[in-house]
Image: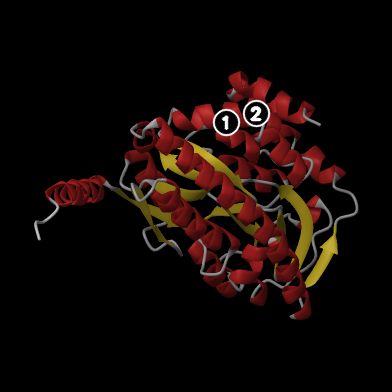
Amino acid sequence: MKPNLKASFAGAVAAIALIGSAANAAEWRGWNIHVEGYPNTVAMDKFAELVEEKTGGEISLQMFHGGTLGSQPDAIEQVRLGGLEIGNFNLGPIGPIAAEANVVSLPFIFKDVPHMFRVLNGEGGEMIAKGMEAKGLIPLAWYDAGARSFYNGAKPINAPEDVAGMKVRVMNNDLYSGMIAELGGNPSPMAFAEVYQALKTGVVDGAENNWPSYESTGHFEVAGYYSLSQHLIIPECVCINADAYNALSDEQKAAVKEAAMESAELQQQLWAEREATSRKMVEEAGVVTNEIADKGPFQEAMVPVYEAYLEANADLRPLVELIQATE
Protein backbone atom coordinates (compact mmCIF):
# COMPACT_ATOMS: atom_id res chain seq x y z
CA MET A 1 0.00 0.00 0.00
CA LYS A 2 1.53 3.30 -1.12
CA PRO A 3 1.90 5.99 1.52
CA ASN A 4 -0.22 9.08 1.05
CA LEU A 5 2.57 11.48 0.15
CA LYS A 6 0.28 14.51 -0.03
CA ALA A 7 -1.09 13.84 3.48
CA SER A 8 2.40 13.18 4.82
CA PHE A 9 3.68 16.41 3.31
CA ALA A 10 0.74 18.39 4.76
CA GLY A 11 1.37 16.86 8.15
CA ALA A 12 5.05 17.77 8.00
CA VAL A 13 4.22 21.35 7.05
CA ALA A 14 1.77 21.59 9.95
CA ALA A 15 4.35 20.20 12.36
CA ILE A 16 6.96 22.66 11.15
CA ALA A 17 4.45 25.50 11.54
CA LEU A 18 3.71 24.41 15.10
CA ILE A 19 7.41 24.21 15.92
CA GLY A 20 7.98 27.65 14.42
CA SER A 21 5.03 29.06 16.33
CA ALA A 22 6.37 27.63 19.60
CA ALA A 23 9.83 28.98 18.87
CA ASN A 24 8.42 32.45 18.27
CA ALA A 25 6.08 32.39 21.27
CA ALA A 26 6.67 35.25 23.68
CA GLU A 27 7.38 34.19 27.24
CA TRP A 28 6.46 36.98 29.62
CA ARG A 29 7.08 37.37 33.33
CA GLY A 30 4.73 39.22 35.68
CA TRP A 31 5.08 40.73 39.17
CA ASN A 32 2.52 40.98 41.97
CA ILE A 33 3.11 41.93 45.61
CA HIS A 34 0.13 40.08 47.07
CA VAL A 35 -0.02 36.66 48.71
CA GLU A 36 -1.64 33.47 47.42
CA GLY A 37 -5.43 33.58 47.60
CA TYR A 38 -5.58 37.40 47.57
CA PRO A 39 -8.07 38.78 45.00
CA ASN A 40 -5.31 40.33 42.90
CA THR A 41 -3.28 37.13 42.92
CA VAL A 42 -6.23 35.04 41.78
CA ALA A 43 -7.09 37.62 39.11
CA MET A 44 -3.51 37.87 37.81
CA ASP A 45 -3.29 34.09 37.54
CA LYS A 46 -6.55 34.23 35.56
CA PHE A 47 -5.06 36.97 33.39
CA ALA A 48 -2.07 34.74 32.61
CA GLU A 49 -4.40 31.86 31.72
CA LEU A 50 -6.54 34.09 29.48
CA VAL A 51 -3.56 35.64 27.70
CA GLU A 52 -2.30 32.23 26.61
CA GLU A 53 -5.80 31.08 25.68
CA LYS A 54 -6.78 34.20 23.72
CA THR A 55 -3.48 34.40 21.82
CA GLY A 56 -3.55 30.72 20.91
CA GLY A 57 -0.35 30.10 22.83
CA GLU A 58 1.55 32.91 21.08
CA ILE A 59 2.10 34.56 24.46
CA SER A 60 2.61 32.85 27.80
CA LEU A 61 2.86 34.66 31.13
CA GLN A 62 4.51 33.32 34.27
CA MET A 63 3.36 35.20 37.35
CA PHE A 64 5.59 35.77 40.39
CA HIS A 65 3.58 36.64 43.50
CA GLY A 66 4.45 37.94 46.96
CA GLY A 67 6.97 40.47 45.68
CA THR A 68 9.50 37.70 45.06
CA LEU A 69 11.16 39.61 42.22
CA GLY A 70 11.73 42.75 44.26
CA SER A 71 9.90 45.61 45.94
CA GLN A 72 7.11 47.48 44.17
CA PRO A 73 9.30 50.47 43.19
CA ASP A 74 11.92 48.06 41.85
CA ALA A 75 9.31 46.10 39.89
CA ILE A 76 7.84 49.28 38.40
CA GLU A 77 11.29 50.15 37.08
CA GLN A 78 11.76 46.61 35.76
CA VAL A 79 8.50 46.82 33.81
CA ARG A 80 9.33 50.30 32.51
CA LEU A 81 12.73 49.13 31.28
CA GLY A 82 11.54 45.77 29.95
CA GLY A 83 13.15 43.48 32.53
CA LEU A 84 9.58 42.35 33.26
CA GLU A 85 6.67 42.59 30.85
CA ILE A 86 3.73 42.72 33.29
CA GLY A 87 3.05 44.15 36.74
CA ASN A 88 0.07 44.61 39.03
CA PHE A 89 0.84 47.96 40.63
CA ASN A 90 -0.78 50.46 42.92
CA LEU A 91 -0.85 53.90 41.29
CA GLY A 92 0.61 55.42 44.47
CA PRO A 93 4.25 54.57 43.76
CA ILE A 94 3.71 55.21 40.03
CA GLY A 95 2.77 58.80 40.86
CA PRO A 96 6.34 60.11 41.31
CA ILE A 97 7.15 58.71 37.85
CA ALA A 98 4.06 59.74 35.88
CA ALA A 99 2.56 63.02 37.06
CA GLU A 100 -0.92 62.22 35.73
CA ALA A 101 -1.05 59.07 37.84
CA ASN A 102 -0.20 61.09 40.92
CA VAL A 103 -3.52 62.95 40.75
CA VAL A 104 -5.38 59.93 42.16
CA SER A 105 -3.19 60.21 45.26
CA LEU A 106 -4.62 63.56 46.28
CA PRO A 107 -6.42 62.93 49.58
CA PHE A 108 -10.21 62.83 49.19
CA ILE A 109 -10.02 63.35 45.38
CA PHE A 110 -12.64 60.61 44.88
CA LYS A 111 -16.05 60.63 46.53
CA ASP A 112 -16.16 56.83 46.71
CA VAL A 113 -15.00 53.74 44.80
CA PRO A 114 -17.77 53.85 42.14
CA HIS A 115 -16.82 57.48 41.47
CA MET A 116 -13.21 56.39 40.96
CA PHE A 117 -14.20 53.83 38.33
CA ARG A 118 -16.43 56.34 36.51
CA VAL A 119 -13.40 58.60 36.21
CA LEU A 120 -10.98 55.85 35.15
CA ASN A 121 -13.36 54.46 32.53
CA GLY A 122 -13.78 57.89 30.96
CA GLU A 123 -11.69 60.81 29.78
CA GLY A 124 -9.86 61.03 33.09
CA GLY A 125 -8.58 57.48 32.73
CA GLU A 126 -7.44 58.19 29.18
CA MET A 127 -5.43 61.20 30.37
CA ILE A 128 -3.80 59.16 33.12
CA ALA A 129 -3.00 56.29 30.72
CA LYS A 130 -1.40 58.68 28.22
CA GLY A 131 0.89 60.08 30.93
CA MET A 132 1.88 56.59 32.06
CA GLU A 133 2.61 55.40 28.52
CA ALA A 134 5.04 58.30 28.08
CA LYS A 135 7.00 56.77 30.98
CA GLY A 136 7.03 53.25 29.56
CA LEU A 137 3.93 51.80 31.26
CA ILE A 138 0.57 51.07 29.66
CA PRO A 139 -2.38 50.30 31.95
CA LEU A 140 -4.45 47.48 30.46
CA ALA A 141 -7.14 47.42 33.15
CA TRP A 142 -7.92 48.92 36.56
CA TYR A 143 -8.20 46.89 39.76
CA ASP A 144 -10.06 47.84 42.94
CA ALA A 145 -7.94 48.53 46.02
CA GLY A 146 -10.75 49.86 48.17
CA ALA A 147 -10.37 52.85 50.45
CA ARG A 148 -7.36 53.31 52.71
CA SER A 149 -7.85 54.24 56.35
CA PHE A 150 -5.62 54.81 59.37
CA TYR A 151 -4.71 52.16 61.93
CA ASN A 152 -2.50 52.19 65.00
CA GLY A 153 -1.95 50.46 68.31
CA ALA A 154 -2.86 53.22 70.74
CA LYS A 155 -6.24 54.88 70.15
CA PRO A 156 -9.07 55.58 67.71
CA ILE A 157 -8.54 58.48 65.31
CA ASN A 158 -11.52 60.81 65.08
CA ALA A 159 -9.94 64.20 64.35
CA PRO A 160 -6.68 65.53 62.86
CA GLU A 161 -5.29 66.19 66.33
CA ASP A 162 -5.42 62.46 67.01
CA VAL A 163 -2.74 62.00 64.32
CA ALA A 164 -0.53 64.74 65.75
CA GLY A 165 2.83 63.42 66.89
CA MET A 166 2.28 59.94 65.44
CA LYS A 167 4.90 58.28 63.24
CA VAL A 168 2.81 56.93 60.36
CA ARG A 169 4.07 54.62 57.63
CA VAL A 170 3.14 55.80 54.13
CA MET A 171 4.01 54.67 50.62
CA ASN A 172 6.91 56.52 49.04
CA ASN A 173 5.08 59.53 47.61
CA ASP A 174 5.41 63.20 48.60
CA LEU A 175 1.62 63.62 48.61
CA TYR A 176 1.20 60.99 51.33
CA SER A 177 4.01 62.47 53.35
CA GLY A 178 2.42 65.90 52.94
CA MET A 179 -0.95 64.55 54.06
CA ILE A 180 0.48 63.18 57.31
CA ALA A 181 2.55 66.30 57.91
CA GLU A 182 -0.51 68.58 57.52
CA LEU A 183 -2.32 66.43 60.11
CA GLY A 184 0.56 67.03 62.52
CA GLY A 185 2.09 63.55 62.21
CA ASN A 186 5.51 62.34 61.15
CA PRO A 187 5.43 60.51 57.80
CA SER A 188 7.65 57.43 57.55
CA PRO A 189 7.94 56.06 54.01
CA MET A 190 9.01 52.42 53.96
CA ALA A 191 8.55 49.22 51.99
CA PHE A 192 5.28 47.37 52.58
CA ALA A 193 7.10 44.21 53.67
CA GLU A 194 8.74 46.09 56.56
CA VAL A 195 5.57 47.48 58.11
CA TYR A 196 4.59 44.58 60.39
CA GLN A 197 7.93 44.56 62.20
CA ALA A 198 8.01 48.37 62.33
CA LEU A 199 4.59 48.43 64.02
CA LYS A 200 5.54 45.62 66.37
CA THR A 201 8.78 47.26 67.51
CA GLY A 202 7.46 50.81 67.64
CA VAL A 203 9.55 52.13 64.76
CA VAL A 204 6.21 53.54 63.57
CA ASP A 205 3.05 54.14 65.58
CA GLY A 206 0.61 53.49 62.78
CA ALA A 207 0.00 52.98 59.08
CA GLU A 208 -2.84 53.23 56.59
CA ASN A 209 -4.30 50.72 54.17
CA ASN A 210 -7.45 48.90 53.12
CA TRP A 211 -9.24 46.09 54.98
CA PRO A 212 -7.75 43.11 53.08
CA SER A 213 -4.17 44.39 53.33
CA TYR A 214 -4.62 45.17 57.03
CA GLU A 215 -5.92 41.64 57.62
CA SER A 216 -3.79 39.52 55.26
CA THR A 217 -0.48 40.94 56.51
CA GLY A 218 -1.37 40.47 60.18
CA HIS A 219 -1.04 44.20 60.84
CA PHE A 220 -4.21 43.98 62.92
CA GLU A 221 -2.25 41.86 65.41
CA VAL A 222 0.07 44.76 66.26
CA ALA A 223 -2.21 47.74 65.50
CA GLY A 224 -5.64 47.08 66.95
CA TYR A 225 -7.43 50.37 66.18
CA TYR A 226 -8.82 50.90 62.68
CA SER A 227 -10.39 54.30 61.95
CA LEU A 228 -12.43 54.73 58.78
CA SER A 229 -10.93 57.93 57.42
CA GLN A 230 -11.09 56.57 53.82
CA HIS A 231 -8.70 59.36 52.89
CA LEU A 232 -7.24 57.64 49.83
CA ILE A 233 -9.03 55.67 47.16
CA ILE A 234 -6.20 54.61 44.89
CA PRO A 235 -6.71 52.11 42.09
CA GLU A 236 -4.30 49.43 40.99
CA CYS A 237 -3.49 48.60 37.40
CA VAL A 238 -2.52 45.67 35.26
CA CYS A 239 0.41 47.34 33.52
CA ILE A 240 2.52 46.24 30.57
CA ASN A 241 5.86 47.44 29.27
CA ALA A 242 5.06 49.91 26.47
CA ASP A 243 7.59 48.47 24.02
CA ALA A 244 6.34 44.92 24.57
CA TYR A 245 2.75 46.01 23.97
CA ASN A 246 3.52 48.13 20.92
CA ALA A 247 5.43 45.23 19.34
CA LEU A 248 2.26 43.10 19.32
CA SER A 249 -0.01 42.68 16.33
CA ASP A 250 -3.41 44.35 16.49
CA GLU A 251 -4.99 40.96 17.15
CA GLN A 252 -2.58 40.23 20.00
CA LYS A 253 -3.14 43.67 21.52
CA ALA A 254 -6.89 43.10 21.48
CA ALA A 255 -6.48 39.65 23.05
CA VAL A 256 -4.19 40.90 25.84
CA LYS A 257 -6.44 43.88 26.57
CA GLU A 258 -9.51 41.64 26.66
CA ALA A 259 -7.77 39.23 29.03
CA ALA A 260 -6.87 42.11 31.36
CA MET A 261 -10.41 43.49 31.35
CA GLU A 262 -11.87 40.08 32.16
CA SER A 263 -9.39 39.63 34.98
CA ALA A 264 -10.42 43.04 36.33
CA GLU A 265 -14.07 41.98 36.45
CA LEU A 266 -13.04 38.94 38.47
CA GLN A 267 -10.78 40.97 40.75
CA GLN A 268 -13.49 43.51 41.54
CA GLN A 269 -15.97 40.76 42.41
CA LEU A 270 -13.46 38.95 44.61
CA TRP A 271 -12.37 42.23 46.18
CA ALA A 272 -15.87 43.09 47.39
CA GLU A 273 -16.17 39.63 48.94
CA ARG A 274 -12.72 39.76 50.52
CA GLU A 275 -13.21 43.25 51.90
CA ALA A 276 -16.31 42.16 53.82
CA THR A 277 -14.62 38.97 55.01
CA SER A 278 -11.46 40.80 56.15
CA ARG A 279 -13.41 43.35 58.16
CA LYS A 280 -15.41 40.61 59.86
CA MET A 281 -12.25 38.63 60.67
CA VAL A 282 -10.35 41.47 62.32
CA GLU A 283 -13.36 42.69 64.28
CA GLU A 284 -13.94 39.16 65.58
CA ALA A 285 -10.25 39.12 66.57
CA GLY A 286 -10.83 42.16 68.78
CA VAL A 287 -9.90 45.09 66.55
CA VAL A 288 -11.66 48.31 67.56
CA THR A 289 -13.11 50.05 64.51
CA ASN A 290 -14.69 53.48 64.36
CA GLU A 291 -16.47 55.58 61.79
CA ILE A 292 -15.32 59.20 61.61
CA ALA A 293 -18.47 61.26 62.01
CA ASP A 294 -17.10 64.44 60.47
CA LYS A 295 -14.35 64.28 57.85
CA GLY A 296 -14.58 68.03 57.26
CA PRO A 297 -11.60 68.93 59.48
CA PHE A 298 -9.45 66.35 57.69
CA GLN A 299 -10.46 67.73 54.30
CA GLU A 300 -9.81 71.31 55.40
CA ALA A 301 -6.34 70.28 56.56
CA MET A 302 -5.61 69.10 53.01
CA VAL A 303 -6.07 72.55 51.41
CA PRO A 304 -2.32 73.32 51.57
CA VAL A 305 -1.59 69.92 50.00
CA TYR A 306 -3.83 70.75 47.01
CA GLU A 307 -2.50 74.30 46.71
CA ALA A 308 1.12 73.15 46.70
CA TYR A 309 0.35 70.35 44.26
CA LEU A 310 -1.44 72.58 41.75
CA GLU A 311 1.17 75.31 42.04
CA ALA A 312 3.85 72.80 41.08
CA ASN A 313 1.65 71.02 38.50
CA ALA A 314 -0.45 73.74 36.91
CA ASP A 315 -0.83 71.68 33.73
CA LEU A 316 -2.69 69.02 35.71
CA ARG A 317 -5.37 71.38 36.99
CA PRO A 318 -7.76 70.35 34.14
CA LEU A 319 -7.45 66.70 35.19
CA VAL A 320 -8.07 67.54 38.86
CA GLU A 321 -11.10 69.63 37.92
CA LEU A 322 -12.38 66.93 35.57
CA ILE A 323 -12.27 64.38 38.38
CA GLN A 324 -13.99 66.73 40.80
CA ALA A 325 -16.69 67.52 38.23
CA THR A 326 -17.38 63.88 37.35
CA GLU A 327 -20.69 62.77 38.82
Question: Can you say whether 316 is above or below 231 in the image?
Answer: above
Quarter in which the C terminus is drawn: top right
Question: Can you say whether 11 is above or below 285 in the image?
Answer: above
Query: Which image quadrant is residue 68 in?
Result: bottom left
**Front-lying residue, 311 or 241:** 241
**Label pair 1/2, CB-CB below 8 angstroms:** yes
Q: Around disc 2, counting alpha carbons within 10 Å, would you say few (fewer than 14), some (14 to 19), or many (20 or more)? A: many
- Residue labelled with disc 2: 124
Query: Which image quadrant is residue 112 in?
Result: top right
Report the label total.
2
Disc 2 is placed on an element classified as helix
**Front-lying residue, 80 or 142:** 142
Distance Cα–Cα, label 1 vs label 2: 6 Å
- Residue at image point 35% right, 38% down: 244
Q: Which amino acid lies under the numbered mark 2 shown in the image of this protein?
A: Gly
Query: Which image quadrant is residue 272 in?
Result: bottom right
Question: Can you say whether 239 is above or below 269 in the image?
Answer: above
From the top left corner, tell me how far across and down residue 63 is, in percent: 41, 59
**Front-lying residue, 299 or 3:** 3
Tag on residue 128? 1
**Residue 37 appears in view:** yes
**Front-lying residue, 74 or 31:** 31
- Residue at image point 15% right, 46% down: 6
Give the left or right position of residue 117, taking residue 247 as reference. right
Tag on residue 276? none
Disc 1 is placed on an element classified as helix
